[in-house]
Image: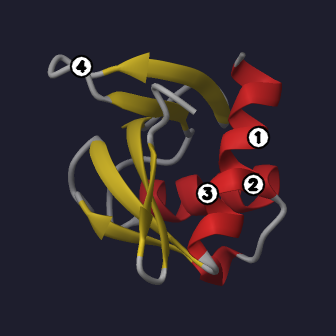
Amino acid sequence: MPGSPVEKVKDGVTVRVRVAPRAARDRIVGLAAEPDGKPVLKVGVTAPPEGGKANHAVIKLLAKSWRMPKTAISVKRGASDRRKLLHVAGAPGEVEERLNAWMRENYG
């Protein structure tokens, strides 16, 4: 999928995410482009960016949306930044296709 924030790695995939903490409600906003042109998945959570609360809320929201266990998703980079690189564990090809299919279905 061109313009996908998902990238295969040896033990799963990484997903580029931009988080808006303290949003009005927990929701996945959609796909957007960073200033460098790289695509990201925009996510808003009501949790504050304190003590990992927003990170936990992002993982919970994405795990539910992607129908996978929360333990499969972790913050690889950007734990205290709005821009995060999440790691999703699993068979790289399967996870990549599953997430890209979900993004096509929900965000064109």
| Spatial CA span between label 4 and label 1 | 21 Å
- Name the N-terminal-most of marks 4 and 3: 4
| Spatial CA span between label 2 and label 1 | 5 Å
Contact between labelled residues 1 and 2, with CB atoms less than 8 Å apart = yes
Image point (84%, 62%), residue name? 67
**Rendered location of residue 47, percent (x, y):** 51, 48
Per the image, the residue denoted by label 4 is 37
Task: Give amino acid for label 4.
Answer: Gly
| Spatial CA span between label 2 and label 3 | 6 Å
Image point (75%, 54%), residue name? 98
- Name the N-terminal-most of marks 3 and 1: 3
Which quadrant, please, contains the C terminus?
top right
| Spatial CA span between label 4 and label 2 | 23 Å
Q: Is 61 situated above or below 29?
A: below
Per the image, the residue denoted by label 3 is 96
Task: Give amino acid for label 3.
Answer: Glu
Label annotation for residue 3 = none
- Considering depth in this image, is 48 or 89 the residue closer to the camera? 89
Disc 3 crowd rating (10 Å Cα; few below 14, some 14-19, many 20+) is many
- Considering depth in this image, is 72 or 97 the residue closer to the camera? 97
Task: Give amino acid for label 1.
Answer: Ala
- Relative side of 87 to 97, left or right: left
Per the image, the residue denoted by label 2 is 98
At mark 1, the secondary structure is helix
**Rendered location of residue 30, percent (x, y):** 59, 23
Contact between labelled residues 1 and 3, with CB atoms less than 8 Å apart = no
Task: State the image quarter where residue 75 is shown.
Answer: bottom left
**Rendered location of residue 74, percent (x, y):** 46, 73
Label annotation for residue 101 = 1
At mark 2, the secondary structure is helix
- Considering depth in this image, is 92 or 85 the residue closer to the camera? 92
